[in-house]
Amino acid sequence: MRITLLAFLGVALLVILHMRRLWLISMVLLPVGCGTLWAAGFFALYGFKLNFMTICILPMLLATSSDYGIYIVHRFTFHGRSDMQDAMRVTGLGVILSALTTLEGFGTLALSVNRGIASVGLISLVGISACLLAALFTLPATLQIWSAQHHNGEHG
């Protein structure tokens, strides 16, 4: 658990250094937070227990899944705050392809006859999928709402 916490702090520090504004930092980390909670809920619902192998994969999931938020937030904010549809059209496909290649690589481990390795594959499939869904749906909706409120606040 210490390694997972250290990995999260490392990811958060890199995001803080790059984004520098609290709302941007929170937007980048939103898919990781939502996806992690959704995955934890899924595993709790189905009685899945963490083991040594699955705990070791958590830092990789945190680091890999934080990329999705970085790509989308960066495109949306640092390229002229274009509309969300434009940001997702350009960046969304890259995020999806990135997640699919990661899912393919780690997800095949779920087919292993070794239960420890199979559990790594399963937690990777569920965790990355949950973070991807949060990046594709929760993050754009949140950015769109924030942008509309910010725009109305400036001109209203």
Image (spheres, rainbow, N blue to C red):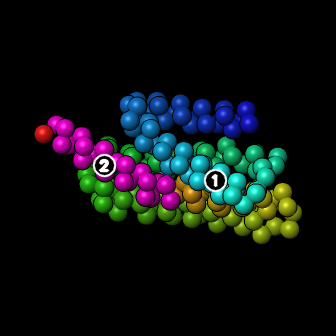
What residue appears at the point 65 percent right and 61 percent down from the top-left corner? 125
**Mark 1: which secondary structure?**
helix
Q: Residues within 10 Å of mark 1 (few under 14, many from 20)?
A: few
Q: Is residue 11 above or below residue 48?
A: above
The quadrant of the picture occupied by the N terminus is: top right
Q: Are marks 1 and 2 in contact (CB under 8 Å)?
A: no
Query: Which of the 4 image quadrants contains residue 130?
Result: bottom right
Question: How many numbered marks are there?
Answer: 2
The single residue placed furthest to the right in the displayed view is: 114
> Disc 2 marks which residue?
145
What residue appears at the point 44 percent right and 58 percent down from the top-left corner? 136
Image position, residue 116 (x, y; %): 84, 57
Q: Amino acid at mark 2?
A: Ile
Q: Nearer the viewer, mark 1 or mark 2?
A: 1
Please tell me whether residue 113 belongs to the stretch shown in magenta.
no
The single residue placed furthest to the left in the displayed view is: 155
Q: Amino acid at mark 1?
A: Gly
Query: Which of the 4 image quadrants contains residue 56?
Result: top right
Image position, residue 65 (x, y; %): 56, 50
Q: Which of marks 2 and 1 precedes in the sequence?
A: 1
What residue appears at the point 42 percent right and 51 percent down from the top-left corner? 139
The quadrant of the picture occupied by the C terminus is: top left
Q: Nearer the viewer, residue 36 or 63?
A: 36
The single residue placed furthest to the front in the displayed view is: 45
Judge whether residue 64 can be spotted in this image.
no
Cα distance, mark 1 to mark 2?
26 Å
Residue 137 falls left or right of residue 80: right
Question: Magenta stretch?
Answer: 133-155
Image position, residue 155 (x, y; %): 12, 39
> Disc 1 marks which residue?
41
Residue 153 falls left or right of residue 48: left
Image position, residue 85 (x, y; %): 30, 60
